[in-house]
Amino acid sequence: MVTPPDTATDGFVAALRAQARRYHDQHPFSRRMVAGELGPPQIRGWVANRFHYQASIPRKDAAILANCPDRDVRRRWIRRIHDHDGTADGHGGTAAGGTEAGGIEAWLRLGEAVGLTREEVEDERHVVPGVRFAVDAYVTFARTRPWVEAVASSLTELFAPDLMADRLAAFERHYTWIDPAGLAYFRARLTQAPRDSEHALQVVTEHCRTPDQQAAAVAALSFKCDVLWSMLDAIDRAYPDE
Ligand code: AHQ
Protein backbone atom coordinates (compact mmCIF):
# COMPACT_ATOMS: atom_id res chain seq x y z
CA MET A 1 0.00 0.00 0.00
CA VAL A 2 1.31 3.43 -0.89
CA THR A 3 1.78 5.53 2.25
CA PRO A 4 -0.55 8.54 1.96
CA PRO A 5 1.29 11.87 1.93
CA ASP A 6 1.61 13.26 5.43
CA THR A 7 0.69 16.83 4.50
CA ALA A 8 0.95 17.99 8.12
CA THR A 9 4.58 16.86 8.30
CA ASP A 10 5.37 18.19 4.82
CA GLY A 11 4.05 21.61 5.85
CA PHE A 12 5.98 21.45 9.10
CA VAL A 13 9.27 20.60 7.35
CA ALA A 14 8.62 23.35 4.81
CA ALA A 15 8.15 25.84 7.68
CA LEU A 16 11.46 24.71 9.20
CA ARG A 17 13.28 24.96 5.86
CA ALA A 18 11.78 28.43 5.27
CA GLN A 19 14.01 29.65 8.09
CA ALA A 20 16.87 29.44 5.59
CA ARG A 21 16.09 33.02 4.62
CA ARG A 22 17.17 34.08 8.12
CA TYR A 23 20.36 31.99 8.15
CA HIS A 24 23.66 33.82 8.70
CA ASP A 25 24.91 33.09 5.19
CA GLN A 26 22.80 36.18 4.33
CA HIS A 27 24.61 38.34 6.89
CA PRO A 28 26.77 41.13 5.35
CA PHE A 29 29.87 39.88 7.22
CA SER A 30 29.38 36.35 5.86
CA ARG A 31 28.73 37.65 2.34
CA ARG A 32 31.89 39.79 2.46
CA MET A 33 33.85 36.77 3.74
CA VAL A 34 32.68 34.57 0.87
CA ALA A 35 33.36 37.41 -1.61
CA GLY A 36 36.97 37.58 -0.42
CA GLU A 37 36.57 41.11 0.91
CA LEU A 38 37.74 40.60 4.49
CA GLY A 39 41.24 41.51 5.70
CA PRO A 40 43.40 39.38 8.02
CA PRO A 41 42.34 41.26 11.20
CA GLN A 42 38.66 40.56 10.39
CA ILE A 43 39.31 36.87 9.64
CA ARG A 44 41.35 36.55 12.84
CA GLY A 45 38.64 38.31 14.86
CA TRP A 46 35.98 35.98 13.44
CA VAL A 47 38.05 32.83 14.18
CA ALA A 48 38.86 33.99 17.73
CA ASN A 49 35.21 34.82 18.50
CA ARG A 50 33.72 31.72 16.89
CA PHE A 51 35.93 29.63 19.20
CA HIS A 52 33.56 30.46 22.06
CA TYR A 53 30.71 28.98 19.99
CA GLN A 54 32.67 25.85 19.05
CA ALA A 55 33.85 25.28 22.62
CA SER A 56 30.26 25.69 23.89
CA ILE A 57 28.65 23.18 21.47
CA PRO A 58 29.56 20.06 23.50
CA ARG A 59 28.01 21.58 26.64
CA LYS A 60 24.92 22.50 24.62
CA ASP A 61 24.67 18.93 23.35
CA ALA A 62 25.31 17.51 26.83
CA ALA A 63 22.38 19.61 28.08
CA ILE A 64 20.16 18.00 25.43
CA LEU A 65 21.39 14.54 26.47
CA ALA A 66 20.67 15.36 30.12
CA ASN A 67 17.09 16.37 29.29
CA CYS A 68 16.37 13.63 26.75
CA PRO A 69 14.61 10.47 28.07
CA ASP A 70 14.90 8.62 24.74
CA ARG A 71 17.84 6.18 24.69
CA ASP A 72 17.81 5.80 20.90
CA VAL A 73 18.05 9.58 20.45
CA ARG A 74 20.87 9.81 23.05
CA ARG A 75 22.86 7.00 21.40
CA ARG A 76 23.12 9.04 18.20
CA TRP A 77 23.22 12.52 19.75
CA ILE A 78 26.31 11.71 21.85
CA ARG A 79 28.37 11.45 18.63
CA ARG A 80 28.19 15.24 18.37
CA ILE A 81 30.17 15.57 21.60
CA HIS A 82 32.87 13.23 20.30
CA ASP A 83 32.93 15.14 17.00
CA HIS A 84 33.84 18.33 18.87
CA ASP A 85 35.78 17.13 21.93
CA GLY A 86 37.45 14.23 20.17
CA THR A 87 37.81 10.97 22.05
CA ALA A 88 40.11 10.50 25.04
CA ASP A 89 41.53 7.24 23.74
CA GLY A 90 41.94 8.67 20.25
CA HIS A 91 39.71 5.95 18.76
CA GLY A 92 36.15 5.78 17.48
CA GLY A 93 34.66 9.16 16.67
CA THR A 94 34.96 10.64 13.21
CA ALA A 95 35.99 13.92 14.76
CA ALA A 96 36.33 17.05 12.66
CA GLY A 97 39.44 17.38 10.57
CA GLY A 98 39.45 13.64 9.93
CA THR A 99 41.26 13.06 13.21
CA GLU A 100 40.15 11.89 16.63
CA ALA A 101 41.41 15.18 18.02
CA GLY A 102 37.94 16.70 17.49
CA GLY A 103 36.52 19.89 16.05
CA ILE A 104 37.65 22.14 18.90
CA GLU A 105 41.25 21.06 18.26
CA ALA A 106 40.70 21.59 14.52
CA TRP A 107 39.42 25.10 15.27
CA LEU A 108 42.56 25.85 17.31
CA ARG A 109 44.60 24.74 14.29
CA LEU A 110 42.50 27.09 12.14
CA GLY A 111 43.43 29.81 14.63
CA GLU A 112 47.14 29.07 14.16
CA ALA A 113 46.65 28.99 10.37
CA VAL A 114 45.22 32.54 10.42
CA GLY A 115 48.05 33.84 12.65
CA LEU A 116 46.60 33.52 16.15
CA THR A 117 48.31 31.68 18.99
CA ARG A 118 46.52 28.73 20.59
CA GLU A 119 46.75 30.57 23.91
CA GLU A 120 44.95 33.75 22.76
CA VAL A 121 42.19 31.66 21.16
CA GLU A 122 41.75 29.33 24.15
CA ASP A 123 41.74 32.12 26.76
CA GLU A 124 39.05 33.91 24.71
CA ARG A 125 40.63 37.33 25.25
CA HIS A 126 39.22 38.49 21.87
CA VAL A 127 35.62 37.35 22.46
CA VAL A 128 33.32 40.40 22.41
CA PRO A 129 30.25 40.71 24.70
CA GLY A 130 27.69 40.29 21.90
CA VAL A 131 29.22 36.95 20.89
CA ARG A 132 29.44 35.74 24.48
CA PHE A 133 25.82 36.67 25.21
CA ALA A 134 24.49 35.06 22.02
CA VAL A 135 26.40 31.81 22.57
CA ASP A 136 25.52 31.62 26.24
CA ALA A 137 21.84 32.23 25.34
CA TYR A 138 22.07 29.17 23.06
CA VAL A 139 23.52 26.98 25.84
CA THR A 140 20.90 28.26 28.31
CA PHE A 141 18.17 27.54 25.74
CA ALA A 142 19.34 23.91 25.50
CA ARG A 143 19.47 23.61 29.30
CA THR A 144 16.04 25.14 30.01
CA ARG A 145 13.73 24.46 27.04
CA PRO A 146 12.04 21.09 26.31
CA TRP A 147 14.73 18.86 24.77
CA VAL A 148 12.92 18.55 21.41
CA GLU A 149 12.97 22.35 21.04
CA ALA A 150 16.74 22.29 21.66
CA VAL A 151 17.04 19.59 18.97
CA ALA A 152 15.02 21.80 16.61
CA SER A 153 17.34 24.75 17.27
CA SER A 154 20.25 22.73 15.84
CA LEU A 155 18.45 22.51 12.47
CA THR A 156 20.36 25.55 11.21
CA GLU A 157 22.66 22.73 10.09
CA LEU A 158 20.14 22.05 7.32
CA PHE A 159 21.50 25.23 5.73
CA ALA A 160 25.19 24.80 6.67
CA PRO A 161 26.61 22.58 3.89
CA ASP A 162 26.17 25.14 1.09
CA LEU A 163 27.75 27.81 3.28
CA MET A 164 30.65 25.51 4.21
CA ALA A 165 31.30 24.77 0.53
CA ASP A 166 31.15 28.48 -0.40
CA ARG A 167 33.41 29.37 2.53
CA LEU A 168 35.98 26.69 1.70
CA ALA A 169 36.09 27.84 -1.94
CA ALA A 170 36.45 31.47 -0.81
CA PHE A 171 39.28 30.69 1.61
CA GLU A 172 41.15 28.66 -1.00
CA ARG A 173 40.68 31.34 -3.68
CA HIS A 174 40.86 34.66 -1.81
CA TYR A 175 42.65 34.00 1.49
CA THR A 176 45.76 32.27 0.18
CA TRP A 177 47.74 33.64 3.14
CA ILE A 178 45.98 31.02 5.29
CA ASP A 179 47.58 27.55 5.42
CA PRO A 180 44.99 25.29 3.68
CA ALA A 181 45.64 22.62 6.32
CA GLY A 182 43.84 24.93 8.74
CA LEU A 183 40.61 24.51 6.74
CA ALA A 184 40.19 20.86 7.78
CA TYR A 185 37.44 21.91 10.18
CA PHE A 186 35.15 23.09 7.37
CA ARG A 187 35.81 19.99 5.27
CA ALA A 188 34.70 17.80 8.19
CA ARG A 189 31.50 19.85 8.59
CA LEU A 190 30.58 19.10 4.97
CA THR A 191 29.78 15.54 6.05
CA GLN A 192 28.97 16.03 9.74
CA ALA A 193 26.32 18.74 9.26
CA PRO A 194 24.12 16.74 6.84
CA ARG A 195 24.44 13.64 9.05
CA ASP A 196 23.48 15.68 12.11
CA SER A 197 20.60 17.56 10.48
CA GLU A 198 19.13 14.37 9.01
CA HIS A 199 18.95 12.90 12.52
CA ALA A 200 17.65 16.11 14.10
CA LEU A 201 14.93 16.43 11.43
CA GLN A 202 13.86 12.81 12.01
CA VAL A 203 13.64 13.42 15.78
CA VAL A 204 11.71 16.68 15.42
CA THR A 205 9.19 15.31 12.89
CA GLU A 206 8.60 12.23 15.07
CA HIS A 207 8.14 14.15 18.34
CA CYS A 208 6.39 17.33 17.15
CA ARG A 209 2.93 16.14 16.12
CA THR A 210 0.58 18.92 17.34
CA PRO A 211 0.40 22.43 15.82
CA ASP A 212 1.68 23.92 19.10
CA GLN A 213 4.67 21.53 19.20
CA GLN A 214 5.48 22.29 15.56
CA ALA A 215 5.18 26.06 16.11
CA ALA A 216 7.56 25.77 19.10
CA ALA A 217 10.08 23.89 16.95
CA VAL A 218 9.95 26.55 14.22
CA ALA A 219 10.35 29.25 16.91
CA ALA A 220 13.39 27.39 18.30
CA LEU A 221 15.01 27.34 14.86
CA SER A 222 14.20 31.04 14.40
CA PHE A 223 15.83 31.76 17.78
CA LYS A 224 18.99 29.91 16.69
CA CYS A 225 19.13 31.95 13.47
CA ASP A 226 19.08 35.04 15.71
CA VAL A 227 21.94 33.58 17.78
CA LEU A 228 24.13 33.16 14.70
CA TRP A 229 23.08 36.52 13.25
CA SER A 230 23.79 38.37 16.53
CA MET A 231 27.27 36.82 16.66
CA LEU A 232 28.11 38.24 13.24
CA ASP A 233 26.59 41.63 14.16
CA ALA A 234 28.95 41.82 17.13
CA ILE A 235 31.98 40.57 15.17
CA ASP A 236 31.23 42.92 12.24
CA ARG A 237 31.08 45.90 14.63
CA ALA A 238 34.23 44.87 16.48
CA TYR A 239 36.25 44.36 13.26
CA PRO A 240 35.08 47.02 10.76
CA ASP A 241 36.50 47.34 7.25
CA GLU A 242 39.78 49.26 7.45
O1 AHQ B 1 30.88 24.39 13.28
C1 AHQ B 1 29.55 24.33 13.55
C2 AHQ B 1 29.04 23.41 14.44
O2 AHQ B 1 29.86 22.54 15.04
C3 AHQ B 1 27.67 23.41 14.71
C4 AHQ B 1 26.89 22.56 15.63
C5 AHQ B 1 25.46 22.89 15.24
C6 AHQ B 1 24.53 23.01 16.42
O3 AHQ B 1 24.46 22.04 17.20
O4 AHQ B 1 23.85 24.05 16.54
N1 AHQ B 1 25.54 24.12 14.49
C7 AHQ B 1 26.82 24.31 14.08
C8 AHQ B 1 27.32 25.25 13.19
C9 AHQ B 1 28.71 25.25 12.91
N2 AHQ B 1 29.30 26.12 12.03
C10 AHQ B 1 28.53 27.28 11.62
C11 AHQ B 1 29.30 28.03 10.52
O5 AHQ B 1 28.71 28.86 9.84
O6 AHQ B 1 30.51 27.77 10.44
C12 AHQ B 1 27.15 26.85 11.26
C13 AHQ B 1 26.47 26.35 12.56
C14 AHQ B 1 25.04 26.05 12.28
O7 AHQ B 1 24.63 26.07 11.12
O8 AHQ B 1 24.27 25.88 13.25
Image (cartoon, helix red, strand yellow):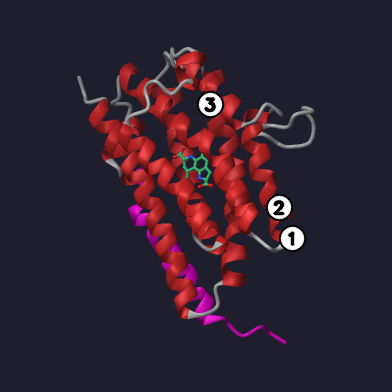
The crowding category of the residue bearing disc 3, from other C-alpha atoms within 10 Å (few below 14, some 14 to 19, many at least 20), is: many
Q: Secondary structure at mark 3?
A: helix
Is label 3's Cβ within 8 Å of ligand 1? yes
Location of mark 1 (residue) = 72
Instruction: Identify which residue is drawn at 31% across, 23% down.
Output: 42
Location of mark 3 (residue) = 107
| Cα gap from disc 1 to disc 3, whole angstroms | 30 Å
Instruction: Identify which residue is drawn at 55% across, 19% down.
Output: 109
Camera-nearest label, 1 or 3:
1
Name above or below for residue 17 compared with residue 194: below
* Quadrant containing the N terminus in the rendered view: bottom right
Location of mark 2 (residue) = 76
Q: Nearer the viewer, residue 141 or 6?
A: 141
Q: Residue 10 appears at what percent x and percent y?
A: 51, 74
Q: Is residue 12 visible?
A: yes
Most distant residue in the front direction: 144
Q: Is residue 192 left or right of residue 118?
A: right
Residue 21 lies in the magenta-colored region: yes
Residue range (magenta): 1-25
The crowding category of the residue bearing disc 1, from other C-alpha atoms within 10 Å (few below 14, some 14 to 19, many at least 20), is: few
| Cα gap from disc 1 to disc 2, whole angstroms | 7 Å
